[in-house]
Amino acid sequence: MENQLAKSTEERTFQYQDSLPCLPVPSLEESLKKYLESVKPFANKEEYKKTEEIVQKFQDGIGRKLHQKLLERAKGKRNWLEEWWLNVAYLDARLPSQLNVNFAGPAPYIEHYWPPKEGTQLERGSISLWHNLNYWQLLRKEKVPVHKVGNNPLDMDQFRMVFSTCKIPGITRDSIMNYFRTESEGRSPTHITVLCRGRVFVFDVMHEGCLMTPPEIHRQLTYIHKKCHSEPDGPGIPALTSEERTRWAKAREYLISLDLENLTRLEKIQSSLLVYSLEDSSPRVTPEDYSQVTAMILAGDPTLRWGDKSYNLISFSNGVFGCNCDHAPFDAMVLVNVSHYVDEKIVENEGRWKGSEKVRDISLPEELVFTVDDKILNNIKQAEAQYLKQASDLQVVVYAFTSFGKKLTKKKRLHPDIFIQLALQLAYYRLHGRPGSCYETAMTRYFYHGRTETVRSCTVEAVRWCQSMQDPSTSPLERQRKMLQAFAKHDKMMKYCLAGKGFDRHLLGLLLIAKEEDLPVPELFTDPLFSKSGGGGNFVLSTSLVGYSRVLGVVVPMVHNGYGFFYHIRDDRFNVASTAWKSCPETDAEKLVQLVFHSFQDMMQLMNTARL
């Protein structure tokens, strides 16, 4: 990381933004051909024939007109999807977003210098915060290295959204406020928000032009901690952010109408670099089992999260950490990058602060005391109740598979990401006796403001291989042949998506053009196979590779009868994080993860026993 940062002095973080290519609009024929291929695993012959006719009719008729209009739109925008995606995927949704949309993850420090230990929360917290604030300073100075694949720079715009960013609830649509500026652009906020026992504090992290040191941050955190533990709890205003969006928007308007100073207080939180939470609980965690801590980070105390904030950094009483982030302004890979940087710095410094212990004369943190009345207090109670009810329904399973990892799969010439995706397909097939429609995130950051595209991992080839694994009459050689065909197909799809030639976002664009033109919804989107194959946000498996570092993350399932399934890949292990709703009788995240681990072993055995 240090070498990368040293090399980056001549390159600025955002310098290539203006030269990135526009997001392309794929060919209509190609997108529809790929779509037809993707519905095959979920259709019998009659259903497929009917969908084929619908697609052909769409291609020859309204689809062509919508595609032309989309091409026209793309001429005037460097990214034709950006605004639409933000609105449709995030800002228009009325569901409570803190639990249903946010992503979260535990910090991996427990695996090296910071095992769980009571009495370490404030000291470790000050060091963790300091490393995070150093990253913020690198961003302000544009010294975070530009991400590249080969010599091709990737879009870095999402990195502007990590700090000083907040979603604001609206009656029908939310909005995003971003207060971050690079040093060359001007002033940027320099304070953080701290939540503890239902109370809200802020303090500036700069003093006389310099970043506070860990001992100085420690002093501020100690002041807040002592104050909150010797006085009554606060009203828990942050819980309102966990509410259904329109209800939260109305409660926010009412809160401001009570006292205009409440708006100033809200703006202080919105503009703060990040929200830091001081939790009283001590979750269990080991390098092999992150389940409990991850559940508490994803679905913990709503009075200790500002659900709309782009970055909530959470600390527990036993010196364990994690983060919870609003998904609207950026995708998880941004936070993975920040978390990896902090993790590397903690290792580099052996978990300690090695600088001066001197503490300058710094103003104490300021408490934001909101003017409230019974109506607001009642709103807070209601928000907490609905949130805790849904949170208690969530099953979270986060285990490490330690028999092998990236090294062995690469040695067998198998791509580790596809290896996990196919193991998941097999596990789902074994558990549910049918194929599982699957969303895997692909990034489109080769393009200006590119975010994501969908790889549909449940292919005809994957299903044929799953069937062969369940058929005792199929030889190991035949099973291996089918598995390698499924690998090749997945690899091809991922390459298409990275090159902006996926089809899910294209189909969404065509649907949104129809809506903007007040045209009837084309039959392609009302065809049962559209949603059965995952279209319209109906994937039963919502998955993503979190990367190749120690950092891990998780989300809730996309649908009630589905699973969230995030994973990371390391040399000697695969860590997987799965979620399911307990109220759905047919899903079980624990069983799914155990079957995924069995699938890993079966696939490796296949490579060892079958000879090409």
Image (cartoon, grey):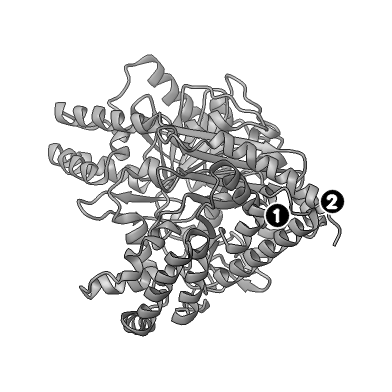
Q: Within 10 angstroms of label 2, few (less than 14), some, or many (20 or more) residues?
A: few
The mark tally for this picture is 2
Look at label 1 and name its amino acid. Pro
Instruction: Tell me where residue 572 sits by quadrant.
Output: top right
Disc number at residue 416? 1
Disc number at residue 1? none
Residue labelled with disc 2: 608
Q: x%, y% of residue 356?
A: 63, 34
Depth order, front residue of 522/581: 522
Quadrant occupied by the C terminus: bottom right
Q: x%, y% of residue 365?
A: 39, 32
Q: Secondary structure at mark 2?
A: helix
Q: x%, y% of residue 107?
A: 59, 38
**Residue at point 67% right, 32% down?**
288
**Residue at point 34% right, 29% down?**
389
* Closer to viewer: mark 1 or mark 2: 2
Quadrant occupied by the N terminus: bottom right
